Amino acid sequence: MLKYILGGIFAEDGDPATDYAIEAAEEYGVDLKNHKATNIRKIHLEEMDLILCATTSHKNMLIQMAPELKNKIYTLKEYTNKNETNLDIKDPWGYDIQTYRRCIAEIDNYLDKLITLIKS
């Protein structure tokens, strides 16, 4: 069974998703209306088998926070495609709906790759 927790490095506990995030996610059949953010510092990272980040800067921050876990920490792109050169998923926060749509499409693409990888 895959155990996962979504956490943000700069998220404030309890923050809702942005309106654009809700709208873009709805286009993929995902309901974020009741989503509440969780700061990564509140998560027991040592219990995770794998920690996937959106950006290399997030990955590096987590490695600084928990260097003993560095062999479990990757970017989503890095983990799903070892030949990927651009390892970051652009953070859409503060941008327009089109940026959120591009972001969620990119995440969807790499999550499909992750599911295929996990199943094999």
Image (cartoon, helix red, strand yellow):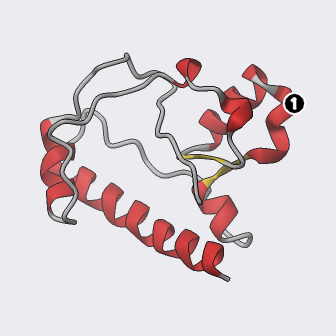
Judged from the image, the secondary structure of the residue bearing numbered disc 1 is: helix
Whether residue 23 sits left or right of residue 85 in the image: it is: left
Q: Quadrant of residue 26?
A: bottom left
Question: Residue sitting at 37 percent across and 16 percent down?
Answer: 12
Placement of the N terminus among the 4 image quadrants: bottom right
Residue at the extreme front: 1
* Residue 106 at x, y percent in the picture: 40, 64
In the picture shown, does residue 99 fall above or below 120? above
* Above or below: residue 6 compared with residue 112: above
Number of numbered discs visible in the structure rendering: 1
Q: Nearer the viewer, residue 79 or 87?
A: 79
The residue lying toward the viewer, choosing from 47 and 18, is 47
Which of the 4 image quarters holds residue 60? top right
Percent across and percent down for residue 42 are 54, 18
Is the C terminus in the top left, top right, bottom left or bottom right quadrant? Answer: bottom right
Task: Name the residue beneath numbered marker 1.
Answer: 68
Furthest-bottom residue in this view? 120
Q: Residues within 10 Å of mark 1 (few under 14, many from 20)?
A: few
Indicate the position of residue 105 as horizontal and vertical percent values. 33, 66
Q: Label 1 amino acid? A: Glu
Residue at 23 percent of width and 34 percent of height: 17
Residue 15 place in picture, x, y as percent: 27, 22
- Residue at x-position 16% and y-position 46%: 22
In the displayed structure image, the side of residue 69 where residue 111 appears, left or right: left
Using the rendered image of the protein, determine whether residue 120 is visible from the camera's viewpoint. Answer: yes
- Work out whether 3 lies above or below 79: above
Can see residue 85? Answer: no
